[in-house]
Amino acid sequence: MAYENPDGVMIGLEVHVQLNNAATKMFCSCTSDYTDSEANTCLCAGCLALPGTTPVLNEKSVEYAIRIGLALNAEIEDETDFFMKSYFYPDLGNGYQVTQFDRPIVKNGHVLIEGEDGELKIRIRRAHMEDDPGKMAHFGTIEKSTGSIIDFNRSGMPLVEIVTEPDMRSAKEARRFLDKLRSILEYLDVFDGSREGAMKADANISVNVFNGKRIEGTRVEVKNISSHKAVEKAINYEIMRQKDFLRKNKPLVQETRHYDEDRNVTVSLRVKETADDYRYFPDFDLVPMFVGGRVEGIRAEMPELPDSKRERFVSQYGISDAHAKSLVTERAFADLFESVAAKVDSKSAASWVADIVKGELNYRDMPITAVSSDDIVSIILMVSKKEISEEGGIAVIRTLLDEGGKPADIVKAKGLAMAADDFIAAAAKEAVAESPDAVADYKGGAENALNFIVGKVMQKAKGKADARLAREMVLKELEKM
Amino acid sequence: MIQKDEMKKLAWVARIAVEEKDIPEFQEKINAKLASYAAIADAPVGGVKKTVNPSRLNTVLRKDTAAPSMSAEDALKNAPEVYETSFKIPKIL
Amino acid sequence: MIKDIASFKAAGSKAVAESLEKIKKDDSGIFITVCGGAESSGSGPLAGVPIAVSDNISTKGIETTCASKILKGYVPPFSGKSADDLEKAGAVIVGKTNLTEFGILGAASAYGPVKNPRDKTKKGGPSGSAAAVAAGLVPAAVCSDAGGLLRVSASFCGTAAFKPSYGAISRFGLIYYTGSLDQIGVTAATISDAAAVADILSGNDKRDTTSLPEKMLYFGGKPLAGCKIGIPEEFLEGVSAGVMKTFDEAVKTFEKLGASCRKISLKNAGYMQPVHDIIAAGESSAMLAKYDGTRFGPRAEADNWHEMIAKTRALFGPVTARRIMLGIHLLMAGQYNDYYMKSMQTRTLIIDEFNAVFQDYDLLISPTTKDVAPDVGGTCGGCDQEFSAYSAAIAGADLAGLPAATVPCGFVGKLPAGLQIIGGYLKDADVIAAAEAFEKETDFVKPQEAI
């Protein structure tokens, strides 16, 4: 059923992606790995904007931008260049940011997401390269601070800013877009999304229907959305605020608002004294770039992306689309599935990796590196050989994650091994012999009586029997009578 | 031509404090410069590509290999005010 | 070996000590900082030769001010490529020369004007580098040149100077205010000396995007015999009678040496000055934004950051301040297309015209400046129009990144006049060869001449 979008919500996103998988920053050879370093120790004269430094562009940041463009089904501009965007701010040492203007390296792409009413195409207007400023911290809150401090370790980090058309109609769609984008970027190996500041989004939100009538909405930009959880909340808050203003007939202003995650509100940024004029002009310290010649080489090396991997998983392994979808969200899970599926039945592999392993890891907030495919393979094999029960298998995984160890040792230590078939057969024979009343009831048509006898078998096996097997054995014994 | 209030605004955009008494001189001299640029009004630039830098080079890229960073001591040596290993500044708002 | 060249023969600790002694006694505002006593190390081609470096080139551990109050006390934690190269070649940097604030022509140095060693009532030019050579304080000085910082100074003081093709010498560590127009050059008593030092500074530097991949060759250029020389008539406009006389003689000398000289017209010449000015203003507004009292340099007191930086930035001299504001105005959306965009396009026209002219001509010559050195206290001390007042012949080579030399070509009274020789892009050796031949034929150059 088509989604009606009752409030005529239009959402566009500007997503800043830090290309932190490059070894160095954008215009200098400083390390990009500053996360655990003391302030102002991962920098050079260029990061600090000391006088007399000259920028030289990192080859990797160009390659990564092209990879992103190809993954977004976009055009790659052959001749591209950089501009200076000028404004004064303490964390912007040079007083200008190096960015792109009218010739972004990537333009006119799209991403498919699962929308409110099925597959939805989100158009990508452009993606451009730029450098990150330093980081400021305040003594107290920004409004009431007595002073601030600046760390320039982040200064000069390579960024790609991806700008969508306002094609999303709900906060949920915006979150799904970001989830999808993050997944694609991780596949591309251009960034590590777990690092602080790796991905940030600004959202442009307008409500274009009021009282069932189409209206000219007011575009409000909400900045500083740094977590995926926050996206939905921030957008929903802003939609609600705009609807509330419309209802109360209060004027909405086209403005930039800041999302305050702690209070879950968007607040207006103080109106600037002068209108924004960033004085974009070409960066004369750099020379033009012709990148067209690099595109085919990069295309040839492109990894398989989530959408095509999902299709392949369904056709190659015969697993369900739901499993495939869940597995491809993160490349590491897809890889884990494939290495498990190489050794065991692929449907079991899919359900163990997608349903059980993923769930147990998420529950514990543990990384996928906490499990190995060998361990999962041996657990699945033990279950399929009925050496342990399915519940036993889950218990092994839980123990493995909580306490460590090898599956075989855990099975032994926890006494999870199932009893052998002949032991169960013997137990079934005994149980039937010891329960004449129940046997009589069963023969008399009381199906419940069977459970009593099976329960006895399980008791004798001290729980190390597969209940289904025990039931089969009991039935066999009863037939003999 | 730049008017007086524009001149004051321009000084603020440039973040250069100019005393009120000096504003007229700034305005006059900048306007004189602007007037002299009328000389390019008739330049036949239709369809002409821009030149940003006289270098004939293009696509100059650097290998993604990290080099050692500057010491915090060197980084902070010229700082007007320091807090631990950070640059300290007066409040921003 | 460079030391075989006459003016570099004075080398070693004695020569350095003598140079330092003379610099300390100097009262012409030539130097901002004297670098005492650094011993020459190694046996490079410039071993023990005292050399001056302009104070807009970063020197590790030595205050570098660009002659601006806003950089007072700034000690770079790194050296510019050219300063490093000089020291690697064994040279001893004996001092940092004065310049107009950030090298902007017309701006005033925070350290006062440079006086001309030949007549201290006259200007020594926008940079102290030529005066340092002319006064016999050092045999060579390294200085950048945008708008004639180096060439105008050399012309006023009667030294030879050379600004190579754009990209020949790394700008790493050069505190330029207009990166697309600026290029490091050298002044010395003779053009051969200047080229010899330029040779040491040249070569690819991975830290500067615009650095040429191949090392520039300065020697073995085309001999003058058979050379076709153009004289752009637009470059002669406003030239004083005295300077014109020296230039006419120079033309005769070139003809005598077998070159053919012909007047030509550059139809875009009238655009050069304003285009240079507009581009320099725009670039300065960005390049001079980093001076905000946050990470280095002096800081004014104020209770919030924006007020603090505005007060700090009031340390820029008025000409520099106006240059920044003008640049900001020109880059704003309302003006951008009419001024800045148009200038970048006109720059293309200028380059294309030079390219076409150099199909037919090997070199272009003209007086370097319209007149000889003006009075120190003259009307152009700290004015906004100084650059255009000095010369119509300077801007073109900057805009197109062409190699340009200036050599003394005579005197008007006791003040020297300069002859500018411009070559095609990367034809640096041809410019040097022509200048050398001219120097040999004339006797305006007297190495280490005592004044």
Image (cartoon, coloured by chain):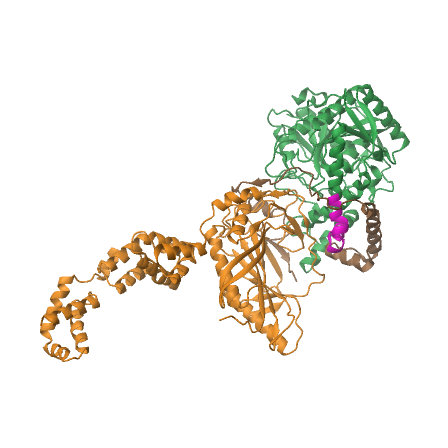
Determine if residue A349 is in view: yes
Instruction: Tell me where residue A63 appears, x and y as whole percent.
Output: 53, 46
Q: Position of residue A164 (x, y in %)?
A: 57, 59
Q: Considering only vertical position in the picture, is C53 above or below A111?
A: above
Give the colour in which the image draws chain A: orange
Q: Is residue C132 visible?
A: no
Chain C, which colour? green
Closer to the camera in the image, C195 or B87? C195
Colour-to-chain, brown = B
Q: Nearer the viewer, residue A48 or A128?
A: A128
* Residue A413 position in % (x across, y down): 23, 59
Q: Nearer the viewer, residue C104 or B46?
A: B46
Residue A32 image point, x, y percent: 52, 48
Tell me: A382 left or right of C249.
left
**Quarter of the image where one finds residue A473:** bottom left
Name the residue rendered at 77%, 50% in the picture: C338
The stretch of residues the image draws in magenta is C325-345
Magenta stretch, main secondary structure, is helix
Q: Is residue A201 left or right of residue A88?
A: left
